[in-house]
Image (spheres, rainbow, N blue to C red):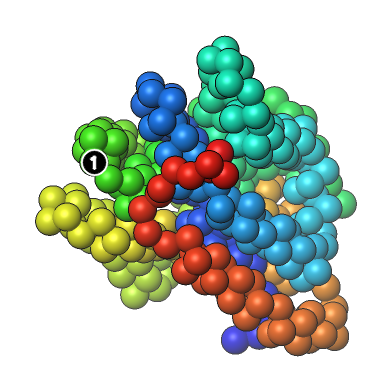
Amino acid sequence: MDLNTLWFLLVGILMTGYAVLDGFDLGVGALHLFTKSDRNRRILLNSIGPVWDGNEVWLVTGGGALFAAFPDVYATVFSGFYMAFMLLLFCLIFRAVAIEFRSKQPMKWWKDVWDFSFSVSSILSSLIIGIALGNLAWGIPLGPDKEFTGNFFTLIHPYSLLIGVLVLSLFMMHGAIYGVLKTEGELQRQIKGWIKSTMIFFMVTYALATVATLLYAPQMSDVLKRSPVFFMVPLFNILAIANIPREISKGNDFKAFLSSCLAMVTLMALFGIDMYPNLVYSRPFSEFSLTIYNSASSQKTLQIMGLIALLGMPLVMAYTVSIYWIFRGKVKLEESSY
């Protein structure tokens, strides 16, 4: 395994960590308005309040790793997807403001405005992330100079929108399971009802996205065709998803959450396997695609950055583990709570 492939794996691990961790708090945000009482909404906010900003560290670290290892991809994607990424950053910032501002005033209209802002920002963030992934899978128009030759509206098409809805449904399911883990009583029973609905939503979009990918983005199955051993990844994914309602029915909330995390990890792994060695697939001229080889930094740079990653990754992991250990258990509202 060469350095280019190792960095492909590292960027994938960082982005997977972001999807798993920030996925559930985006999902909680998307479900936020389904509960009506002020107390229950505060509980949902406080379930993610201590951890949401730490979750986004994985996105920042992943972006930094992409810039260091594959600068051409970073330049092409961030310039071509500029409007989409600005909208994503706006949504992420706005939902953070909503979390902090909601309880600053006692008026009902004030809280309702920030609740709406929090939920809409979470939904839009999930959709934009999915649309970006959909375009990477579908392919975007690239020129021989590695520049994006389309515009913002080039990125909006039925397949990318379908993947956007798929990611939203996945995050909602993941967020509902996390909500069950962090709540109790009547609110927990209400959220358990959401799990069934979100799982149906996810499974329908998952099936549609799978069929659409096989029909209209056949390059995404090339690696599986060449190496059938990788079929174990979608198999593990299906088993993990199927185990969620089983664990929920038994009251094993933590095991259900682990199954949800495994489902997201295997989905991201499948996406990475299908993309390899491409990082940005070019459509209609596949010869202009950006791969882990024609878009990478020099071998010396990859070696130096690899040493930095060996030092930095344990710190990110230690920070994440410590935060979740400190704020483990059910949510209890206190005077200092959101």
Report the amino acid beneath label 1. Answer: Gly
Disc 1, SS: helix
Residue 185 image position (x, y, % from top left): 23, 41
Residue 57 image position (x, y, % from top left): 67, 59
Mark 1 — residue? 185
Relative to 336, 305 lies left or right: right
Relative to 112, 35 lies left or right: left
Mark 1 packing: few (<14 Cα in 10 Å), some, or many (20+)?
A: few
Is residue 78 at all visible to an observer of this figure? Answer: yes
Q: Which residue is at a point 12% across and 56% down the rendered structure image?
A: 250
Residue that extends furthest to the left in the rendered view of this protein: 250
Tell me if residue 160 comes above or below residue 263 in the rendering: above
Q: Which residue is at a point 54% across and 71% down the rendered structure image?
A: 322
Q: Which residue is at a point 41% across and 48% down the rendered structure image?
A: 332
* Residue nearer the viewer, 61 or 29: 29
Tell me if residue 307 comes above or below residue 150 in the rendering: below
